[in-house]
Image (spheres, rainbow, N blue to C red):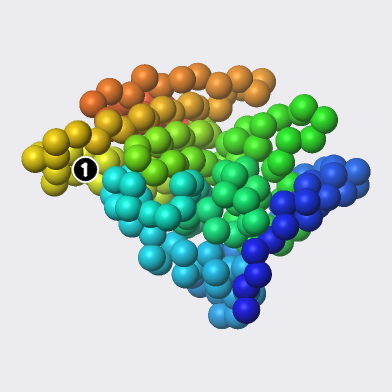
Amino acid sequence: MFQRIRKNDLINQSVNERAKDGRNLCEENVLIEMNNPDSLQQRILELNQRFNLIDFLLGESEVETAIGVITPKQSLFLECELVDTDHHAYNFQALYNAIYDANSAILPYKNKNTWQEFVMQDGNIAIQLTKFGDFYLWCPEKIHLFQVQQLKKINEQLKSIQIINPGLINPVFLDIHAWVGIDDGKEISIELENASLDNLLDYYEHHHQNFFHK
């Protein structure tokens, strides 16, 4: 049976890993393809299966925060129920532990790099959500076609929120921001309009097609 991971255990993991040889990710575990997932991996699959992006952004959840990751091989979204805190960073670390078996520390250590920077450096998209409309993405500069396809699916869901709720007395205002990691640890902000990812997709599909991976 799954028990929530202690925040302090994740902090100690990060400190211990950085004291060794640093980060050296192993091959990615595609959770849905695993024959014998451990309790953490199974819990992630359960949370991912029941997660509904539109319902969550409309505030229909008892949990305040959620996270998403889009790797070159899988897309996972879940409410922050893996750790004894609903803080995005610690739950993302737990998610990373399930995807990568070893040396997966992404928590900040001695003020070097944010966890989002590590995720982008790994070629993955990190997504932070809070209910009632906050939606933040951190994306790598080089992106796979699978990741583009997943972003398009999310974009259609975001656009549908206002369409399916035209009669709301208080309209849902989505606060959506996106950043793309570039060289030397720098990031550029992609201006998003009309509560959509159109400009982010345009950035990839028209300005950086040569960066697509098969």
In the structure shown, which secondary structural element does the residue marked by tag 1 occupy?
helix
Q: Residue 172 placed where, x, y %?
A: 24, 36
Image point 60% across, 63% down: which residue?
29
Location of mark 1 (residue):
161
Determine whether 79 is above or below 4 in the image.
above
Residue beneath the point at 37% across and 30% down:
176
Identity of the residue drawn at 90% across and 43% down: 19
Outermost residue toward the right in this view: 19
- Vertical placement of residue 119 versus 9, above or below: above
**Residue 64 pos. (x, y %):** 46, 47
Quadrant (top left/top right/bottom left/bottom right) for the N terminus: bottom right
**Residue type, mark 1 in image:** Ile
In the image: residue 182, left or right of residue 75: right
In this image, 184 relative to 210: left or right? right
Q: Nearer the viewer, residue 168 or 209?
A: 168
Furthest toward the left, the residue is 167
Residue 30: x %, y % from top left: 54, 64
Where 185 sits versus 172, above or below? above
Residue at x 29%, y 49% (from the top left corner) = 54
Q: In this view, does 153 lie to the left or right of 95?
A: left
Tell which of 67 and 7 is nearer to you.
7
Is residue 210 something that shows in the picture? no
User: Tag 1: Cα neighbours inside 10 Å, few (<14), some, or many (≥20)?
Assistant: many
Q: Report whether residue 14 is seen.
A: yes
Residue 167 x, y percent position in the rendering: 9, 40
Q: How many labels does the image show?
A: 1
> From the viewer's perspective, is residue 196 above or below residue 96?
above
Indicate the quadrant where residue 48 lies: bottom left
- Viewer-closest of 109 and 26: 109
